Structures are given as C-alpha cells and as structure tokens.
Image (tube, grey):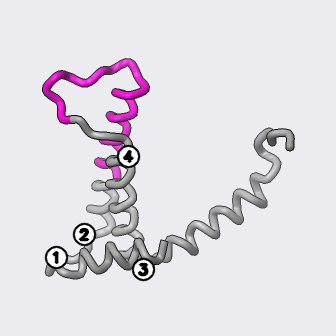
Amino acid sequence: MKELQQEVDAYISQFKEGYFSPLALTVRMTEELGELAREVNHFYGEKPKKNDEKEKTIEEELGDMLFVMICFANSLNIDLEEAHNMVMKKFNTRDKDRWTRKDS
C-alpha cells in the first residue's frame, strides 16, 4: 500500500495544482462510486447498456475509486496501511462472532 501511495504522490506532485481539497475529493469519490454502481447495474442488474454507451469495466471503475481514495489519504497524510490495520483489528475483535463461520 505504501508503494501505491508513493506512486500516486509522485504523479500528483508533478502538477502545480497538487491534491484537490478534501471536499473536492469526496465529491470525486462519490462520482466514481456512481460510475461503479452504473457498471454493476449493467452487468448484474436489469439495466443493459445503450448501444452507444462506452464499454467500461467494473475493474476500471474500482481502479478509479482506489486512485481517488489514495489521493484523499495522501492529501490528509493518512497511511492507508495503518488505516487498514486499524479496521482489521476492529473486525477481528468487535465483529469476531458477528457472522456465521464456515466449518473447517
């Protein structure tokens, strides 16, 4: 994850504008989530694409979301690996008995 954050930072750092504001990044993430939802709906839902709509993939939209999320974290100096570790600790403690486990 650190390498991904460094790669995105190297890309963004070459531009004078730098990172967008947290508000703008939240809006961008929401926009990308909408595009992901649209692709999921086309692929798994009841709404097929129109003939003139550009072919996109769920993979591409997830990549777009990941890029914006990394930008958001970098702009706020958040280490996503540490954030991930905090969340996994929460799931492995607070939620350890919340779901039905598979038989092993």
Q: Main secondary structure of the magenta part?
A: helix
The image position of residue 33, as x and y in percent, is 36, 46
Mark 3 crowd level (few <14, some 14–19, many ≥20, 10 Å Cα): few
Q: Which residues are magenta?
A: 29-54
Q: CA distance from mark 1 to mark 4?
A: 28 Å
Q: Amino acid at mark 3?
A: Asn
Q: Which residue corresponds to the image point at 22% horizontal and 77% vertical from the top-left?
A: 18
Q: Which residue is mark 1?
A: 17
- Whether residue 91 sits left or right of residue 65 in the image: it is right
- Label 2, on which residue? 20
| 3D distance between C-alphas at marks 1 and 3 | 17 Å
| SS at circle 2 | loop
Frontmost residue, 83 versus 43 = 43
Q: Secondary structure at mark 3?
A: loop
Q: Quadrant of the C terminus?
A: top right
Q: Which residue is denoted by mark 3 in the rendering? A: 77
Instruction: Check if residue 52 falls in the magenta segment.
Output: yes
Q: Which residue is mark 4?
A: 59
